[in-house]
Image (spheres, rainbow, N blue to C red):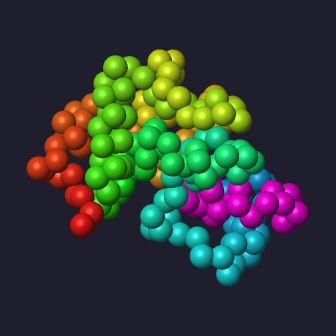
Amino acid sequence: MRSRSDLPEDDNTLIKLVVAGYTHQQIADAYGVSRQAVSQRLKGKVVSRQTFPVIVDLLPWDLSSVPSRPALLRLHIYKGLRGYVSWLDGRSVSMEDFTARKTLINRLLKGEVVSFREGEKFVYEPRSDAANLVVAWPDIMGEPGPQVRRLLTWNPAKAQEMCDLNGAARLKG
């Protein structure tokens, strides 16, 4: 067993893994440390898989260093992802997120997924993987965690229900 110092220096990496659905034991196994080392490192931080996931924590791209991050998070594509995840998590959405979610679903039905051009913006591109997610999942990221699978898996059978304003849209206000 390696020492606790073998964990990443940045606590956000560990927090993202927990939010993605990994247990402290799974994280410990990945870094070759004890479960207690992970628990101790996260002690005092409010981290829960039950907490509503922040979309950027589910995505495979590091957006923290993008200079225009606030503008990026206001884009229609991002709002579509937010609306999609909110619906799957049983949360209400704004009309704007609902409309963006409909656009996202139409693009998914055409065989496209959301991707990110490094340092630029979110884009739609043709699906080129078998991961069946709404985002292009880079191979370098390994297998998505259970939380990512639960909230970003594409299910065409639910498309109509997700776009039905009179049905289960769950609009705010």
Quadrant where the N terminus lies?
A: bottom right
Percent x, y for residue 40? Answer: 74, 76
- Residue at 84% from the left image edge and 60% from the top image edge: 9
User: Between 118 and 19, which is closer to the camera in this rendering?
Assistant: 118
Give the farthest residue toward the bottom: 44
- Residue at 32% from the left image edge and 57% from the top image edge: 93
Answer left or right for 18 relative to 119: left
- Residue at 40% from the left image edge and 39% from the top image edge: 153
Residue 95 among those drawn in magenta: no
Answer left or right for 113 relative to 89: right
User: Between 25 and 122, which is closer to the camera in this rendering?
Assistant: 122
Percent x, y for residue 152? Answer: 43, 42
Q: Is residue 33 above or below residue 39?
A: above
Residue 11 among those drawn in magenta: yes
Answer left or right for 66 relative to 76: right
- Residue at 68% from the left image edge and 81% from the top image edge: 44
User: Between 127 and 96, which is closer to the camera in this rendering?
Assistant: 96
Q: Is residue 88 visible?
A: no
Q: Is residue 155 above or below residue 3?
A: above
User: Between 168 and 51, which is closer to the camera in this rendering?
Assistant: 168
Answer left or right for 62 relative to 102: right
Query: What segment is highlighted magenta in the picture?
Result: 1-26
Q: Is residue 18 visible?
A: yes
Corner quadrant of residue 86: bottom left
Q: How many marks?
A: 0
Percent x, y for residue 139? Answer: 64, 28
Quadrant where the C terminus lies?
A: bottom left
Percent x, y for residue 24? Answer: 63, 64
